[in-house]
Image (cartoon, grey):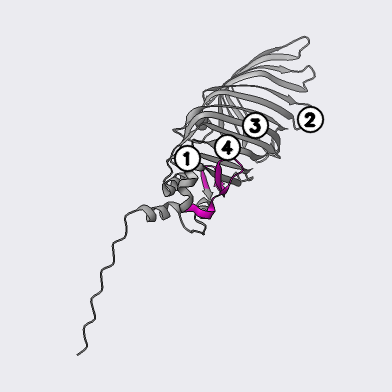
């Protein structure tokens, strides 16, 4: 059998693509003992309509009874790094069950964010990671699994609210994060992603977070911003009692919450730092704090004496 320039799409129950592949080349033959054996190549595959995998290659095997499909030792490229793994599917049921294991090595953080549909980024660093998934084809709520990503010596542009806090506190590290250590561990249950440990460490700061992503895709993260003793001593007079001792030795912290979408997160960090609730846009508040002062009002003319 030979298929050239083929296309494949698997939809979930809402009609959203779980997996789609283009420029498929599939070649194989029926073996005596192994069932159907062949090779698969695809120029590009897209997972969950977001993550772009390139140059997928895999040996394919279908059992003699047509009940099991396996892609053993597949290779691909993601974020200009090497992606390897295994995938199996039980075809004996009306809704096939699948299992996938993947490992990523040597990926560029900048290109990984692009391939994950986060747009163009100036981030730098080398990423490695792993992912294990099981589920039922076409049923997003059946997905279970776990995974993680890690990087060393990465440089990233912080999200806007951290940049603005860096401006408010005059903390340069919050304007451009140079990370000596960074990791994100997560698991999936019933199709929902839960961040178990997001940990970013720079020279004087730590950013930590954990919590679920809601079914809508919005964040619900309990987060902490930690300052080492050097920064704590400088900021104590400004932040006062808002700083509390952290479990990590040598650090104080401010706890806060992150909501909104990953592309446009929202936070109550400024309220936690100042100790009182502030309405309106944070950027506008900072412009008021650091912008051009308003002109002093002109003294009013004295009233004319009555005659």
Q: Is residue 179 above or below residue 244?
A: above
- Residue mark closest to the camera, 2 vs 3: 3
Q: Is residue 177 left or right of residue 49?
A: left
Residue 168 percent across, percent down from the top left: 43, 49
Kindly check if marks 2 and 1 are in contact, taking CB atoms under 8 A apart as contact.
no
Residue 10: within the magenta? Answer: no
The answer to whether the residue labelled 1 contacts the one labelled 4, judged by CB atoms less than 8 Å apart, is: no
* Residue where numbered disc 1 is placed: 158
Foreground pick, 43 / 265? 265
Left or right relative to 28: residue 243:
left
Within 10 Å of disc 1 (Cα), the crowding (few <14, some 14-19, many 20+) is some
Can see residue 219? Answer: no
Task: Give the CA separation, mark 1 to mark 4.
Answer: 14 Å
Q: Is residue 241 visible?
A: yes
Judged from the image, the secondary structure of the residue bearing numbered disc 4 is strand
For label 4, the crowd category at 10 Å Cα-Cα, with few meaning under 14, some 14 to 19 and many 20 or more, is some
What stretch of residues is rendered in magenta?
Answer: 238-265
Q: Which residue is mark 4?
A: 199
Task: Tell me which numbered mark, 2 or 1, is placed earlier along the sequence.
Answer: 2
């Amino acid at each position: 059998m030979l298929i050239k320039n083929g296309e494949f799409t698997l939809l979930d129950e809402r009609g959203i693509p779980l997996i789609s592949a283009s420029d498929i080349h599939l070649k194989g033959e029926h073996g005596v003992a192994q069932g159907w054996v062949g090779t698969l190549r695809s120029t590009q595959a897209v997972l969950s309509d977001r993550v772009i995998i390139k140059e997928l290659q895999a040996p394919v095997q279908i059992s003699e009874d047509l009940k099991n499909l396996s892609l053993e030792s597949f290779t691909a490229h993601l974020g200009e790094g090497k992606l390897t793994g295994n995938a199996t599917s039980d075809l004996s049921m009306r809704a096939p069950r699948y299992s996938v294991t993947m490992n990523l090595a040597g990926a560029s953080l900048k290109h990984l964010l692009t391939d994950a549909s986060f747009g163009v980024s100036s981030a730098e660093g080398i990423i490695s990671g792993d992912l294990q998934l099981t589920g039922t084809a076409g049923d997003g709520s059946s997905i279970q699994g776990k995974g993680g990503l890690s990087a060393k010596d990465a440089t990233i542009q912080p999200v806007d609210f951290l940049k603005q806090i860096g401006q408010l506190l005059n903390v340069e590290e919050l304007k451009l994060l140079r990370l000596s250590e960074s990791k994100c561990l997560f698991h999936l249950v019933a199709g929902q992603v839960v961040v178990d440990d997001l940990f970013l460490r720079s020279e004087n700061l730590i950013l930590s977070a954990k919590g679920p992503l809601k079914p809508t895709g919005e964040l619900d993260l309990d987060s902490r911003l930690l300052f080492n003793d050097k920064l704590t001593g400088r900021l104590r007079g400004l932040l006062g009692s808002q700083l509390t001792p952290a479990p990590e030795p040598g650090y104080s912290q401010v706890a806060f919450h992150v909501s909104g979408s990953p592309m446009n997160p929202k936070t109550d960090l400024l309220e936690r730092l100042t100790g009182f609730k502030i309405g309106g846009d944070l950027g506008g508040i900072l412009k008021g704090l650091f912008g051009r002062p308003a002109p002093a009002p002109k003294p009013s003319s004295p009233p004319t004496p009555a005659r």
